[in-house]
Amino acid sequence: MESSEARQPISPADYSAFYDALFASLHPEYGHPDPLTLTSIVGFDCGGPVSLNTFGRGQGAPITTYVTCELAVRDDQVPSDSGCFELLVTTNDEAWARDVIDSIAGMSLAATFGLGHTVDVGPSVAKDHPLQGVFFDFPVTFEFGGFTHAVFPLIGMFRAEMEFARAHGVEALKQRLIAAGIHPRSIANRTSVV
């Protein structure tokens, strides 16, 4: 596959096929997406929230997965090492997920992100929210139009966990989250693993 930096823009006529390929790559882990896309009257291009597809929303499950569905097709997104990308959050807190996704979606138009990067999301979420940071986890990748694209899971961290990850590496924190049965979810009502 070719470098994502040399990719040709995805035509609006190909958006449906592109997102079919994206959701097919997520199917083994998350199943089928819910039928409705979460959008707003004021779109992302005009300063509104990014559009989201969900897995498990409204089905009585305590955890929902949220996936952006308009970033990787943009000409102005800064590609990662894994290609142009969408964002994914699995959480029990929809408001937090939306705040974090909208913030990082905007940043993705100006900054390079990739595996293991950490982001302090404190300015974007409620001051008293326990999850004040995220890290970019190993992406799900898929091919479309001769190029590799990615879906990056964002994993929520308490401030102390973020400081630990920055001092000892994201992988060290990830192993603690796995051992505690938290990873790959972003759960606010839990205790810190550091």
Image: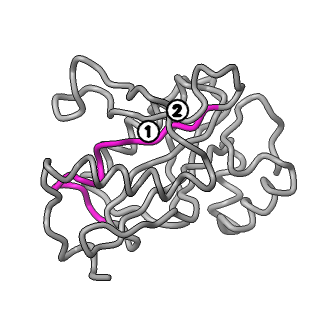
Residue 96 horizontal side relative to residue 160, left or right: left
- Please name the residue that numbered disc 1 is placed on: 101
Question: Of helix, strand and loop, which one carries label 1?
Answer: helix
> What percent of the width, then of the height, locates residue 124?
45, 32
- Looking at the image, is 142 positioned above or below residue 182? below
The magenta stretch is 64-79
Q: Residues within 10 Å of mark 1 (few under 14, many from 20)?
A: many
Q: Residue at x 27, y 73 (%)?
A: 4
Kindly identify the residue that appears in the image at 59 percent across and 38 percent down: 132
Q: Is residue 30 left or right of residue 43?
A: right
Q: Main secondary structure of the magenta part?
A: loop
Return the x and y of residue 6 as percentages of the image width and height.
18, 76
Q: For residue 117, which numbered disc appears in the image?
A: none
Name the quarter where the N terminus is drawn.
bottom left
Any magenta on residue 16? no
- Is 128 displayed left or right of 7 in the figure? right
Q: Nearer the viewer, residue 28 or 133?
A: 28
Colour convention: one colour
| Cβ atoms under marks 2 and 1 closer than 8 Å | yes
Residue at 71% of width from left, 25% of height from top?
A: 62
Q: Disc 1 marks which amino acid?
A: Ile
Instruction: Tell me what residue is drawn at x 66 percent, y 43 percent.
Output: 159
Find disc 2 in the rendering and name its residue.
97
The mark total stands at 2
Asked which secondary structure carries label 2, the reply is: helix
User: Taking 182 as reference, is 34 above or below it?
Assistant: above
Using the rendered view, name the quadrant where residue 41 is placed: top left
Q: CA distance from mark 2 to mark 1?
A: 6 Å
Q: Give left or right: position of 117 versus 73.
A: right
Percent of width and height locating residue 187:
71, 35
